[in-house]
Image (tube, helix red, strand yellow):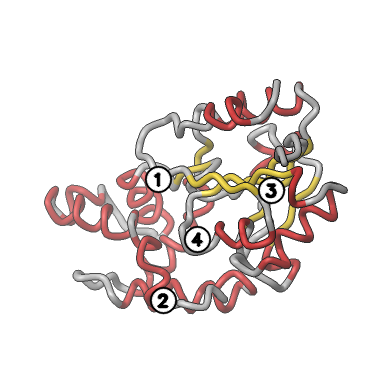
Amino acid sequence: MNPKPITAVLFDFHATLADGGDAQASLDAAWARAGRLGSAERTLGTGRYRRLAQDVHHLWDHVHDVDPEGRRDLSPERHRAAYDALMGRLPRPVDPDLAQAFYEVMPDQWRPYADTLPTLTELKRRGIALALVSNTDIDLRPILARWQMLELFDAVILSMEERVAKPDARLFQRALDALGVTAGQALMVGDSPFDDPGAAAIGIRTLLLPRTEGRNHGLGLVLRIVPG
């Protein structure tokens, strides 16, 4: 039996539609937020400055070591606890004030990939229903609105609001219900081999895009999969 045509696409947010921003720019922003005088690079020295920027930039790569059950995005408190645990594992300690500043500036550093808006816009032009399905401890709607993307989504499903997180199939099912489609009519697009295959467990075709460092993320592949 042939699969049903795809009429809806569910998107993850982090490392799917947006990246974490520039590592050194994030350190500079945190340095300023912490009220540190002078340049972070001049104060720390170039070598230490670059190492610290990269350490924090890749901090969340190891989150499943401290949160194997993926419960960090059920509440801001759990998320902060996971962050503190990760900061404590860095090879070079970060003082509490700077760690706090890093946490505060983190959402401001996120940037959409260059192919995010064109891909979403084209899917809407094709009449495809769109949902954001994200494990997050903050409301992503203001960020999407700032990027002129919020109106493109028919549903925004966030773990902190639903009190359930990926890979739990219930989060994906709530997105399907919000869009009024079945699992066989949907495509899930994400990056995490831990979280996003939960969609496949209930019959949603699932595309995992590996994390990239460039401005384009390969989202054009979605347009090749979804009928025009």
Quarter containing the N terminus: top right
Q: Tag 4 or tag 2, which sits nearer the N-term?
A: 2
Q: Residue furthest front?
A: 1
Coordinates of residue 132 in the picture (x, y in percent): 69, 48
**Residue at disc 2, secondary structure:** helix
Q: Nearer the viewer, mark 3 or mark 2?
A: 3
Quarter containing the C terminus: top right
Q: Residues within 10 Å of mark 1 (few under 14, many from 20)?
A: some
Q: Residue at x 66, y 37 (%)?
A: 146
Judge left or right: residue 226 versus residue 71: right
According to the picture, the residue beneath numbered tag 3 turns out to be 132
Coordinates of residue 176 in the picture (x, y in percent): 79, 53
Q: Tag 2 or tag 3, which sits nearer the N-term?
A: 2
Kind of residue sitting beneath label 3: Leu
Q: Residue at x 64, y 61 (%)?
A: 138
In depth, the one of 173 and 2 nearer the eye is 2
**Residue at disc 3, secondary structure:** strand
According to the picture, the residue beneath numbered tag 2 turns out to be 84
Between the residue at mark 1 and the residue at mark 4, the CA separation in whole angstroms equals 24 Å
Coordinates of residue 24 in the picture (x, y in percent): 30, 45
Q: Nearer the viewer, mark 1 or mark 4?
A: 1
Q: Residues within 10 Å of mark 2 (few under 14, many from 20)?
A: some
Between the residue at mark 4 and the residue at mark 3, the CA separation in whole angstroms equals 23 Å
Q: How many marks?
A: 4
Between the residue at mark 3 and the residue at mark 1, the CA separation in whole angstroms equals 18 Å
**Residue at disc 4, secondary structure:** helix
